[in-house]
Image (spheres, rainbow, N blue to C red):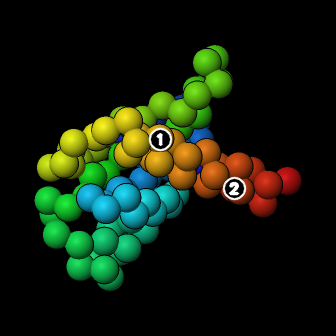
Amino acid sequence: MARSRFSGNGKEEVFVVMTKNFKVFVANTKKGIRMWIKQRAIARHNFGLFLCWPDKKNNTIRITTIERPKFYLTKKRLNALSAACVYFLTKQRAQME
């Protein structure tokens, strides 16, 4: 999996960008996220960058904010963010097996 300054133990983690109008993109690397933002010419104040990983103890998804968005993180947005993370991680595990 991706290794970053946020984890030294090699846990499964993904980078997620969410735009103001609920478009979510998930990638293994920060570079992939930056290229996606650049291709779509998204303004700096219209997206938030997050780091997500599964929490095996509570069976949930942990979310850390890397770049704080300029819009409110409502419950609806957080649910969309965690759903995208779960979908990406399950798809990625299926490809590894």
Work out whether 24 lies above or below 14. Answer: below
Residue matched to label 1: 79
Residue 9 image position (x, y, % from top left): 54, 32
Question: Farthest residue toward the right?
Answer: 97
Judge the density around disc 2: few (<14), some (14-19), many (≥20) Cα neighbours within 10 Å: few
Which residue is labeled 2 in the image?
A: 92
The amino acid type found where label 1 is placed reads Asn
Relative placement, left or right, of 61 versus 21 is: right
Q: Calculate the distance from the C-alpha at mark 2 to the C-alpha at mark 1.
A: 20 Å
Q: Quadrant of residue 43?
A: bottom left
Q: Amino acid at mark 2?
A: Gln
Sequence-wise, which precedes: disc 2 or disc 1?
1
Residue 93 seen = yes
> Is residue 19 shown left or right of residue 84?
left
User: At x 58% / y 34%, what residue is drawn?
Assistant: 54
Q: Secondary structure at mark 1?
A: helix
